[in-house]
Amino acid sequence: MATTDDGVSMFNEPVRNHYFKTLDSAGFYMQKIDTTKTLANNKANFLESRKWYKRMEPMLMAYDYENYLSMNAPNLLKVEIDDYTDIKVLKPKSYQVLEELLYSEDGFDNADLNFVLEYLKVRIPYIRRNHILFRQNDRHHLKMLRDAIVNIATKGITGFDSPMLANSLNEAIYNYETIREVLHIYEPAFSSKALYKTWLTEIGRTISDLGNGEFDTFDRYTFIKEHTNKQLKLIHKTAVDWNIKLNTSRALNPSATNLFDKDFFNIKLFSPPGAPAISQDRIALGKMLFNDQSLSSSGNISCATCHQTEKAFTDGFKKAKGIDGIELLRNTPTLTYAVYQKTMFYDGRATGLEDQIVNVVNDKNEFHLDLNTLEKRVQENPRYVVMFDSLYNGQITNRNARHAIATYIRSLAPFDSKLDKNMQGVEDSMTQEEILGFNLFMGKAACATCHFPPAFNGTVPPKYMESEFENLGVPKNASFEHPVLDEDPGQYYPYKVEEKRSFFKTSTVRNIEFTAPYMHNGVYGTLEEVVNFYNVGGGQGMGLEVPYQTLPADSLHLSDKESKALIAFMKTLNDEQFEKIN
């Protein structure tokens, strides 16, 4: 590759110039939006500004992520908490808010419009002046292309950031136009001209397929299988062609060539820094500890008591049961794919699997033990002594014991479901109903705007650095005619922030067929009820007062056929081992 003497890519300047062009164009049309203009005029300028923003987005996301999050924020209050004395509740000022204001059927207040415009009109030039595109090298730009491709497939085509217009397919085209432009800039860098031509052909076909699609009926299943996965393979081939290595210190495995590969994620980045490597022997040790009832004060419960293998590591109860069968606060979530969450428990009070285990051990209604006692009990078991001797250099500490258990839990993400095998090209067995369900999940039904593939949980692509929490207005009874709002405060505690009341972490949809009952309180016993709950617009849609609900209250207008297809698709997310057990 061609670089300057200090390692900066010789193609950095034209990439930067394209960034400036998109920023300046987005800003130009944003400046033309004004409350003195007609609504039609403002809508037209919004669409032009948004078009250029989407062309800017791959670079903004790669090189100015905080501003990307701000400018792309959903129309929801953001709560920033440093401590009990420093709590900020911020109103969003983003393109999404602007879209909802301009296209709302109920009209809008000019003060609200100006509030957003004042921010964006200043922020875009600010980003231009304070850019950091100075010393990027080729691997930075290739990673930018890779992340853009992943973002389009996992968020861009789902309606995540075009809530009113559902203009996602056109906006994905604008993303791809920048991908094509960067590839054009890099044409001299390709030693294989055939590879460069393959890229151009592939991008052209992708744009064509997006341009010929309609949001509600777009075949996202085929798009990901035939375009996204092909492009990830091309990224890998390009890295080889350019003789570069993508950074391994990111959440995504740099050599992954399929969105649904078992190794799509870089699992090391979902473990504590400096933690021992995941190995089959450590997994086996962790499984023993996971099933060991002697690690509880009562001597009759273990991790496996609530997380039962045959129920996809849940327990089948509405709410979990602790010592002496006492009912705990919430439903037992599956541990499958829990590794790919950034926080644990429904209220996010633990920062990782090892931290979660501390909470369980100390809880008076669960293990009701302390870490020192747990450590001592492990040390007294001769079998553990032998295993820790070889796996942890003889260091039998509660930290190593927790790491072993967490390592076992991290192994519960095989990506071997029917959907995975079909996306990986191992099988061609998806039915038309299941494919329809996938496309609804990723589009019209808006499920994927919170349950992001491939883990189908709330960990947000493409950085996969944070997990989302939502307020759905979940009732405490299963009646759709006479619902009563659940009183669980969720994230309200410990800071007592009203705007976080009833917020809960978005769980994975994988293995959902075997994890009933559903929701944080186990209120729904069937998937049909769950789909109906979302279809009617959650608590607000049922007439409940849920002031901070994040789920749109409007009906999804799913037909019976579509609802059944959604459920059929979700059942394709069952891991192979649970299919065999059940």
Image: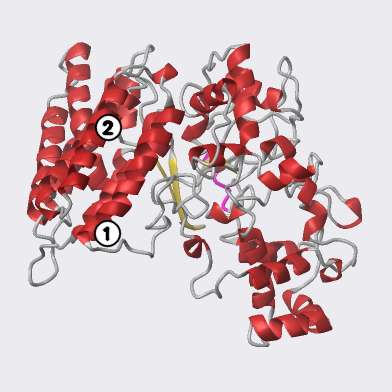
Check disc 1 and give the amino acid type: Val
Say which quadrant the C terminus sits in: top right
Span colored in magenta: 495-499
In this view of the protein, which residue sits in the foreground, 60 or 275?
Answer: 275
Q: How is the image coloured?
A: secondary structure
* Disc 1 to disc 2, C-alpha distance: 44 Å
State the mark number for residue 131. none
Q: Callout 2, which amino acid?
A: Val
Residue nearest the viewer, comparing 240 with 334: 240
State whether the magenta stretch is mostly helix, strand or loop: loop
Give percent across and percent down for residue 323.
Answer: 87, 57
302 left or right of 576 in image: right
Q: In the rendered image of this protein, does residue 2 appear above or below residue 531?
A: below
Please identify the quarter of the rendering in which residue 4 is found: bottom left
Q: Which residue is labeled 2 in the image? A: 116
Q: Is residue 317 visible?
A: yes
Q: At 37% across and 58% down in the image, what residue appears?
A: 254
Q: Position of residue 52 (x, y in %)?
A: 18, 32
Residue ID at (53%, 28%): 438
Give the image quarter of residue 175: top left
**Mark 1 crowdedness (10 Å alpha carbons): few <14, some 14-19, many ≥20:** few
Q: Which residue is mark 1?
A: 240
- The residue lying toward the viewer, choosing from 295 and 178, is 178
What percent of the width, then of the height, locates residue 518? 71, 35
Residue that appears at 79% across and 52% down: 306
The answer, for residue 536, to whether it is visible in the render is no
State the SS at label 1: helix
Q: Quadrant of the N terminus?
A: bottom left
Left/right of residue 119 with respect to residue 163 in the rendered view? left
